[in-house]
Image: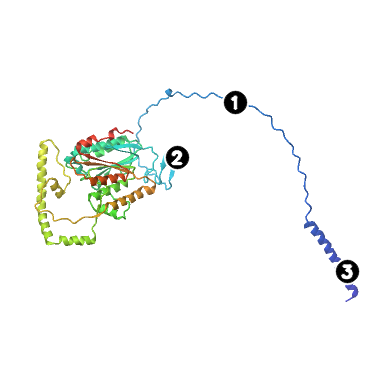
Amino acid sequence: MNPMLLNVLLISGGVHALALFILGSITVYKYIVPDEAQFEEPPAIVEEQPPPEVKIEIKQQAAPQAQSMQSLRMKQVGNISVTAVDVELPSMQESFTVSAGLGSFGGGSLLGGTRGSIGIGMSDVSVFGLKTRAERILFVIDANRHMVTDAKGGLNSYKVIKDEITDMVGNLSTGTLFNVMLQDRRKTMLFKDHLVSAGDQVHQQLIQWITPVNSNPNAPGLEGVPQARQPKLKALSDEVVHETIIYSGDRGNETAFLTQYALEQNVDAIFFITGYHKGFERIRRKPTERENEEWARTTASSKYQKQLAEHKLEIPEMEQRVKAELDRQNAERKAKGLPPRVLAQRYGVYSNAGELELEWKTKHPGWQPSHWIEERDVEKYFRELVDVLYTDKGSAKPSINVILFLAGDEAFNKEAEKSLNSYVRSFAGKNRVIRGENEIKSARSSKETKN
């Protein structure tokens, strides 16, 4: 290589290297090395003088004079009657409370379904001396022919019962909801399809509806009334006790049946006026397959079949004896100005013969033994029923009160009395036993109950 060219290249490279070094140093100094911090002197604080004190004179004003109470008067503008309207309101799933002294609603619908209350329809209720306070009330009246037998005062005593209920309805507050149920064993008939508000118009409707009941000795109770039917129970339909209540017409089963149907009406208070009530009793159940087989062997015996055949031959004769004896007694009663006698059963030849004290020549060889669900299991079922219908929906269970109307000498032993007391106590209610026409007249209390 030419030595001169080499020297030129070396000199050029050195010049470029020096230039790059100088430029790089300038860049680092300008952009990377920070400037020294500069602090400005804070502005001077100027003290200000407070505003001059101002005094204001406040003069007390004279209190306004109270308006004289003597100048205030209330003027009655009259009664306003409103036709009962069945209004279906939407169900409220959330519970809520209305404060400021109004009360509270439980979860459920406002007027139907689960019970709710703001207290505007509360009434004092007194039926034959049994008192409570409620705003959704059900009166259940036994209309069976055993309520109008001679020993209980006949049709006259039953008129007292009807008057007691209609007078109580007439004295309810306008906002109180009520209904009346007639029952003849397990057949029932409601005054209205739903609870209705008390008032003058509906009171007159009730009087017209109930007056014909047990006013004719030849048509007692709900016999032959097409509207009277056995209702269907809804709650706990899969339970054994539910099925058993429906199965039999035994009196304990009927009491349980009517209790459940009344509870399903969604009320605060229930009044039973009845000729039979022993509280929660054991109830008659269906026999098992084994029990039916054992009874079949008994009825297949020659002794049983022979006596049964002889007894059946006597039934038409006994029916004629019953009719003849009843005709004889009614003829004597007519001569004395008394109404015809009403027997406790309509077509029961066995009960009629016993009531008229007629003896069979050949007695029935016997019926299949009864099988039972015990009282403690019935009570457990009704505790669960109340939970389903009321407690689980945020409502208190209703009170149940029982007026038991018996003949003067009708048996009602200590065990039955204890069972009835336990029944009403479990529903925070009361009971009273009234015997005969004189007692039921003197026991009336609804007419003097004001709301």
Secondary structure type for disc 1: loop
- Residue type highlighted by circle 2: Ser
Q: Which mark is residue 120?
A: none
Check whether the beta carbons of the residues at disc 3 and disc 1 lie within 8 A of each other: no
Task: Measure the alpha-carbon separation of dots 3 and 1.
Answer: 102 Å
Q: Nearer the viewer, residue 397 or 343?
A: 397
Q: Which mark is residue 58?
A: 1
- Residue type highlighted by circle 3: Ile
Q: Quadrant of the N terminus?
A: bottom right
Residue 166 percent coordinates (x, y): 27, 37
Is residue 184 shown to the viewer in this render? no
Chain-order first, disc 3 or disc 1:
3
Q: Quadrant of the C terminus?
A: top left
On the image, which quarter does residue 169 sit in? top left
Residue 243 percent coordinates (x, y): 28, 54
Q: Which mark is residue 99?
A: 2
The residue sitting at the front extreme is 414
Q: Is residue 152 above or below residue 230?
A: above
Q: Which mark is residue 11?
A: 3
The residue located at (9%, 47%) in the rendering is 321
The residue located at (25%, 52%) in the rendering is 283
The residue located at (28%, 33%) in the rendering is 447
Secondary structure type for disc 2: loop
Check whether the beta carbons of the residues at disc 3 and disc 2 lie within 8 A of each other: no
Mark 3 closeness class: few <14, some 14–19, many ≥20 residues within 10 Å: few
Mark 1 closeness class: few <14, some 14–19, many ≥20 residues within 10 Å: few
**In the displayed structure image, the side of residue 82 where residue 41 appears, left or right:** right
- Residue type highlighted by circle 1: Ile
